[in-house]
Image (cartoon, rainbow, N blue to C red):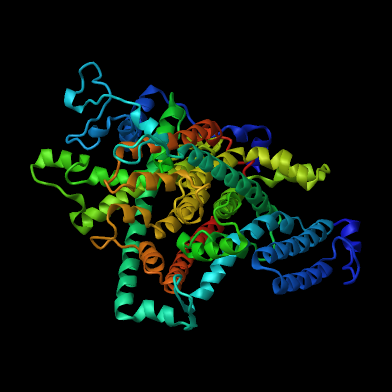
Amino acid sequence: MTAVSSTLLTPRLTAVVAHNWKLAIAVAVVVSAISMAGLPAAVSFWVVGAAAALVAAAFTVNAYRRHYFGALLVAPAIAVLFVMNIFPLLWSLGLSFFAYQANQQTIRFVGLGNYVRILTNDLAAHATWGALINTAMFVVFTVSAQMIVGFLLAILFAKQFPLRKYLLILVLTPMMLSVVASGVFFTYYYDPTFGILSYVINSISGNQFILMSNKVGAVAGIVFADAWMWSPFVMLLVLAGLVSVPKYLYEAAAIDRISSWRQFWMITFPYIRGLLMLALLFRTIEAFKLADLVILLTKGGNDTLTISYHLIRIANEQNKTSEGAAISYLMLFMVIVLTNLYLYLANRRTKGA
Amino acid sequence: MAESILGKLGFGRASGVDKAGWGRTLAVAVVAFIYFLPVLFIIFTAFKPQGDALLVPPTLSPTSLFGLIPDHFVFKPTLENFGSVFSRSMTPDGAPEATGFDRYFFNSIFIASASVLLALVIGTLAAFGFSRYPLKGNDTYLFIILTTRMLPAIVVIIPVILMFRVVGLSGSYLGIIMLYTAFNLAFTIWMMKSFFDELSPDVEDAARIDGSSGMRVFFKICLPQVIAGLAATFVFGLILTWNEFLFALLLSGPDTRTVPVAMNQAVSSGGRGTDWTLLAAIETLFLVPVFLVTFFLQNHLLRGVTFGTVKR
């Protein structure tokens, strides 16, 4: 674009200039190797970190001088994600090919053994598939309940009326509660002897009512609690879309006497589609990980074990670390397929429009 | 074309928020009140005398509302429970001891705000990069970032515990703040990117032609238009981080313990079952900061200038 970027040649390896990233990498590799060989782990970590920072600095200067703004802006986020997420994820991917338990010292390579076990072994596979089917059920029920309730709430709040601000915060509060507290209080609401729900139904029907006594009741209880907590999330995203629709579009539609149904699909929907997609995406991912409410409300009883809770049991309570890692990669595979399907559909819609 | 001309005249800012009267207020109030009831019950429980928590039928109101509510539904409000959050006797007849909850509240506030703000700064820059200067394989990067959000926390946590132990970060503020920052990044980047994508390039291009640098365009033109997005992302990130339990349980030390972890220990220790009034008191106090932040950022959330001035 400018004269600078076209004349900026790649420096020779030995040239000590700020944007010589090749030299920085060479120095970093040598320093890291020496420190890892000769220093204790805690010290050498920081030395390696400093070497990585040196490389990063060289890359930064290089990118800045060459006007690679995209890479510059994205780099810090990628760096944090790499250290805190991607590196641990790769680590546990590696673990899933070994027989390893967190409370033992031995480690043995078993290849795909863990995956074969969780998918075909009589006992383990039965639990895995049961938990997966339950999870699929929870994903469908909780996400659709949240989308519907959240959407309806957003429509209620989409106009400017007196005290709107104060009423909105009331609806947002369930989302702000700690799951520990609200989950424990839901066990109280559903409790057959002390709970409000049983009290009300008992006094109407005269029979002892126990919500959690069968699968339908247990699932309904969990879905209700989850939908109650997270519908406001969907509502906020939809609302942000709804209030952003320019008024003149509606005015034009009114002049053309377009029916309100068509108005919704032609004007409103395109504005909220992106945010609706985002809400759907993040809620589906979270629903796949549903565990805390199940732990608090049913402890997996009445056939409500989800894959995420199954995983916590295996990895944490039974200490089968590598088998847990295998299950979680099975989960990841499914979520990736699902989200790709969502994104594919969303992109096709955008291009078609 | 017609749209962009209207936009330049300033009409784009007139959003589709219609006015409605008190009738609407009444209808929404009924819905909002029903939605809020379970929370209200928790807050009321925090004010109940200890023996009242498990009465059947439950007591529902601190006042009889001039005789509207029958006496057996009314409880005498007390502030005792809030006192015992910070200091109570741990044994049946021991003297009151400090519970350390003041420290836990500070930890929660410090860790949550530091990590959410850090994620907001780093994530907004990245989102702008992804939106305006697409890299080769942009979508792949974005998808990998999203996958970091897909795995259950328990999977990441085993390697992270080992890593932190080696490095000496376990139980430190820095470790848990960095971890939370990473977990907020995925959402921040996706959210802010969707806001930047909605901005019109027209105004920016005009500014660039007039000789504004990339930095100036970002700070003076793009950022002011996505304030609502920043506020929304901040609120979501804060709420998620504020209530995060699993990482905090496994990675915080005695000095960096956050309230959800301490709350779980406080109500389930002693083997006497759940201490309902204490749990309610902790939760009520714990709700206040995040409630206030959300309340004050609400104006930004709903001002109706959420998206760009000119629609593509």
Q: Is residue A223 above or below residue B31?
A: below
Q: Which residue is painted at 8% across and 42% down in the image? A: A206
Q: Quadrant of residue B89?
A: top left
Q: Is residue B72 above or below residue B151?
A: above
Percent across and percent down for residue A86 are 58, 65
Is A159 or B74 nearer to us in this picture? B74
In the picture, which quadrant includes the N terminus of chain B? Answer: top right
Q: Is residue A56 above or below residue B76?
A: below
Q: Is residue B8 left or right of residue A226?
A: right
Q: Which residue is painted at 59% across and 66% down in the image? A: A87
Percent across and percent down for residue B294 are 50, 35
Can you name the residue that lies furthest to the front here?
B94
Q: Which residue is painted at 52% across and 34% down in the image? A: B293
Can you name the residue that lies furthest to the left here?
A206
Percent across and percent down for residue B136 are 69, 65
Q: Is residue A171 visible?
A: no
Q: Is residue B73 above or below residue A238?
A: above
Is B4 or B83 nearer to us in this picture? B83
Q: Is residue B285 visible?
A: yes
Is A339 or B283 nearer to us in this picture? B283
Percent across and percent down for residue A207 are 8, 45
Marker count (numbered): 0
